């Protein structure tokens, strides 16, 4: 009976381990949920097409269907095209991320202004007072230095 249970647990663990790569998200499907998905789909298709062409070129070169001269002449433009497609996708992702961050920031600011007209802290600026003591001459206050380093271990 115990052997049956252990065998079932091993089988379940094996299924989970084998399926993990298929369950991970690549980050691309979330880009398809946004407006203007035609652009990202076109970029992804271009990337996939160029990478497939590179893979086919590598294979043909390895089995001897394409000689070294033709391979070198063909691989450079394909690599540049693949790099351009990948960079375009990265720019699109960065733009989408920045737009999402801006939207979240606007939501937070709207929530702050709706909750307390004075900015949420009685009208005072949120400043770390300990880090901003400055004497009239524009130099840091020595009292702050002593408070941060009471034993004087880090004196210059």
Image (tube, rainbow, N blue to C red):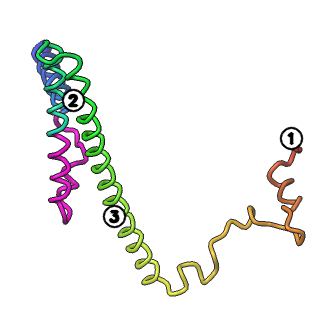
**Residue behind mark 2:** 74
**Residue behind mark 1:** 153
Which comes sooner in the sequence, label 2 or label 1? 2
Label 1 or label 3, whichever lies nearer to me, is 3
**Residue behind mark 3:** 100
Other-residue count near label 1 (Cα within 10 Å), few / some / many at <14 / 14–19 / ≥20: few
The chief SS type of the magenta part is helix
- The answer to whether residue 72 is left or right of residue 116 is left
Secondary structure at badge 2 equals helix
Which comes sooner in the sequence, label 1 or label 3? 3
Given residues 78 and 132, the one toward you in this image is: 78
x then y, percent, for residue 120? 53, 79
x then y, percent, for residue 25? 22, 43
Secondary structure at badge 1 equals loop
Give, as a single range, the part of the protein colored magenta.
Answer: 22-48
The image quarter in which residue 54 lies: top left
Given residues 134 and 50, the one toward you in this image is: 50
Label 2 or label 1, whichever lies nearer to me, is 2
The image quarter in which residue 46 lies: top left
Which disc number belongs to residue 7?
Answer: none
> Residue at horizontal 88%, vertical 60%?
143
The image quarter in which residue 123 lies: bottom right
Given residues 83 and 121, the one toward you in this image is: 83
């Amino acid at each position: 009976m115990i052997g049956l249970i252990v065998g079932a647990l091993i089988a379940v663990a094996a299924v989970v381990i084998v399926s993990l790569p298929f369950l991970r998200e690549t980050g691309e499907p979330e880009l398809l949920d946004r407006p203007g998905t035609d652009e990202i789909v076109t970029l992804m298709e271009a990337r996939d097409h160029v990478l497939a062409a590179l893979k086919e070129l590598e294979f043909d070169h390895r089995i001897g269907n394409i000689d070294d001269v033709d391979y070198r002449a063909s691989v450079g433009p394909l690599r540049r095209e693949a790099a351009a497609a990948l960079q375009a996708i990265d720019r699109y992702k960065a733009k989408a991320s920045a737009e999402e961050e801006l939207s979240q920031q606007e939501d937070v600011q709207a929530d702050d202004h709706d909750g307390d007209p004075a900015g949420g802290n009685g009208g005072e600026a949120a400043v770390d007072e300990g880090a901003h003591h400055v004497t009239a001459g524009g130099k840091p206050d020595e009292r702050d230095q002593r408070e941060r380093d009471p034993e004087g271990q880090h004196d210059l």
